[in-house]
Amino acid sequence: MTDTDVAIVGAGAAGLAAARTLTDLGVPFVLLEASHRIGGRAYTEEVSPGVPFDLGCHWLHSASLNPFVAIADSFGFHYNTQGISLRIRLDGAWAGETVQEERDAFFERNLDLIAQAGERGRDVAIAEATERDSRWTAPFDYFISLMASADADRVSTLDYHNYNDTGENWPLKEGYGALVARFGADVPVTLNAAVARIDWSAETLSLTAPQGEVRAKKVIVTVSTGVLGGGHIRFDPPLPGAKQEAIAALPLGNHNRICLVYDHDVFGADHPHGATLLNQGSEPMGFSIRPFGYDYVVGFTGGRFADWLERAGVEASVDLAKENLKRAFGADIVKHVARHSVTAWRGDPWVRGAYSAALPGQAHQRARLAEPLDERLYFAGEAASPDFFSTAHGAHLTGIRAARAAASSLGREQNVETDAADSAG
């Protein structure tokens, strides 16, 4: 049995930020992580020696407001401030300028329709607020499924509007997962410690994990709504109805990536770095092509289609990506694929999805999810962020917020300046 001031459940971006903040404030804590690694949905692996691939988050979204930019700078990481532009590959040929402009105008017009609904406080499905009878509806819905990890009929216009998007989306060369892991490298954490029960019936809370029991004055819960909504942690007494409703209103969608690794560069230096493949009779599919000069491409799937493809298995995902590439660029384009890596976030037992999207009519639930219970049970994570949900930095900021609130309720003096804690900690 371990006694501490604060117990943190989950060592993703939120949990690590909470731990670093409590360290700076001099508050004792225990950090429990169900997985064998830290980082949560920030995870980088090498698909070949020295070649990183992000299975989870990859872009420094809203970069001018993103604390991970300063963290990346402090650790010597590199990022591309130009972002990525997806050119249209239409039935085997690059689309002309007129077609590109038509697509861009449709996207801009429909994003404006979402914004108008949000500004009026209209909380309906994106599919209800946008144009449904256009050749560009399917590509637009595909775009939404990647941004929200859920389909347009399952995403709230008001929630989407509330996201603070500066348009600065910078990919990380060394990997976002590697950055989060570096940020948390010095944080003491107990791995393979899946919390099965949190008893908050008494003044001192107790947590049950395979290694034993932890007793704490405060608990910060940072696990996903997929884990919370699935009942994988038992709360005694059960969470109040309002909290359970908030969790159910913010389900995780799905977003998976299919990485095809080449044995050499088959595209050439002048090839666009991103493409949306529109092949007749197939779902739209976007690809990142040789990011940072690495010899691989990454195909993206989202929403229900990502779920269906994940259930179909790794080989089905690889076959789909190859077929789309062959139809777009010719059969030779896949002859030199040497290996692959395919994500499966819905099946990850410690996450159970990609990131949260508020259901239509439920945008207000993020604030409810973030509310502490009895100043003893605190909630953090991307789903609890009002304006940076679905991002690592959104989770990071909620972790800092929860840690400060817990420390304050313990009567500890906050001796760390806000700006410093919001950056590297």
Image: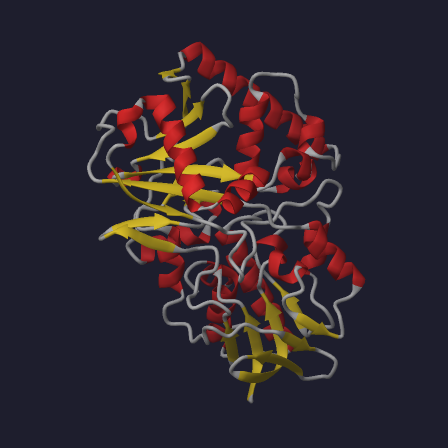
Where 378 sits versus 3, above or below?
Answer: above
Q: Is residue 94 left or right of residue 25?
A: left
Tell me what residue is drawn at x 37 percent, y 16 percent.
94
**Which of the pair 124/277 is nearer the observer?**
277
Tell me what residue is drawn at x 56 percent, y 36 percent.
145
Q: Position of residue 249 (x, y in %)?
A: 71, 50
Where 235 sits versus 205, above or below?
Answer: above
Q: Position of residue 196 (x, y in %)?
A: 61, 74
**Which of the pair 282/111 is nearer the observer?**
282
Tell me what residue is drawn at x 37 percent, y 35 percent.
288
Q: Is residue 250 left or right of residue 413?
A: right
Q: Is residue 350 left or right of residue 257?
A: right
Q: Is residue 290 left or right of residue 71?
A: left
Where 331 sits versus 263, above or below?
Answer: above
Q: Quadrant of residue 261?
A: top left
Quadrant holding the N terminus: bottom right
Give the total of numbered labels: 0
Q: Position of residue 206 (x, y in %)?
A: 64, 82
Q: Residue furthest right?
A: 241
Res. 223 visible in picture: yes
Q: Residue furthest bottom?
A: 1
Quadrant holding the C terminus: bottom left
Tell me what residue is drawn at x 44 percent, y 40 percent.
316
Res. 416 visible in picture: no
Q: Position of residue 317 (x, y in %)?
A: 44, 40
Q: Quadrant of residue 124?
A: top right
